Amino acid sequence: MSRTAFPDPSIAVSPATRLTPKDAATLIVIDRSSGRLRVLFGRRGERHVFMPNLYVFPGGRRDRGDHTLPYIRDLHPQVLERLASGSSDPAALRRGRALALAAIRELHEETGLFIGRQSEGAAAADLANLRYVARAITPPGNIRRFDTRFFLTFTDEAGIDPGDVRDSDELHDLTWLDIEATSGLNMPLITRTILEDVIDRMKADPSLPFGSPGPFYYSRRGRKFRGDI
């Protein structure tokens, strides 16, 4: 089975195109309440320039203001350290935390689910149960390029009801699918690859410890690499 992590040729442009990857965050949400693991997917609209009509995890680009979003609990120290690449520099830590906040914001905007506390006119995210499971940079030559961090959480830990999902302008046909039965789903190769990585790791330890390493997919000078985060 292929372990490369690059988008389909249908979304590629001229190899001469060189775009700087934009920070992005994705959140893999797993429901384990029924005894079978189910993962949340949604279909991107046909008008999207990047990956139209493909099923993906909720997520999107990090916004400039994400670092100022309120939160009630911070990331696990090992998660924050890895997001900052081991740096204790405050700017690196803020950037790492902003990526996690972006993942929760995008989840809410695209699915209606929110991880944290909501009250009238105010909301604060809860970052404490987010794992950092993968990173992938879109190769040069694509119409959009993102440096995406993949987070993961479980519905019971996050305090969210799987039945509360709703379609949005960004994601349609939101559905919870058996994690082992997604082979027929039309999804980007990177999505399928990282899902396979998660499945393999959960077979070794279903709790997915916060300090566990994960894959980092990137390319240099036309060559594809798989490193560690």
Image (cartoon, grey):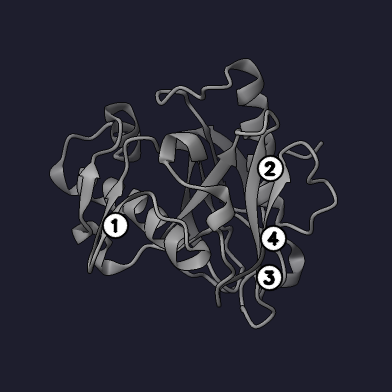
State the image coordinates of residue 12 (x, y, percent, origin top left): 68, 70
Query: Callout 3, which amino acid?
Result: Ala
Query: Which amino acid type corresponds to the residue marked 4 in the rendered image?
Result: Tyr
Residue ID for mark 1 = 118
Mark nearest the camera among 1 and 2 is 1
Residue indicated by mark 4: 55
Is residue 207 depicted above or below 167 in this figure? above
Dot 2: few (<14), some (14–19), or many (≥20) neighbours within 10 Å?
A: some
Whichever of callouts 1 and 3 sits on the residue coming sooner in the sequence is 3
Say whether disc 1 or disc 2 marks the residue closer to the N-terminus.
1
| Outermost left residue | 90
Determine whether, in the image, residue 63 is placed left or right of residue 167: left
Which comes before the other along the chain, label 2 or label 4?
4
Q: Quadrant of the C terminus?
A: top left
* Residue linked to disc 2: 193
Q: x, y (%) of residue 187?
A: 73, 57
Q: To which residue does mark 3 refer?
A: 12
* Vertical position of residue 18 compared to residue 150: above or below: below
Mark 1 and mark 4 lie on one chain; the one further toward the N terminus is 4
Upstream in sequence: badge 4 or badge 3: 3
Q: Secondary structure at mark 2?
A: helix
How far apart marks 2 and 4 lie (CA) works out to 13 Å
Q: Residue at x 32, y 53 (%)?
A: 101
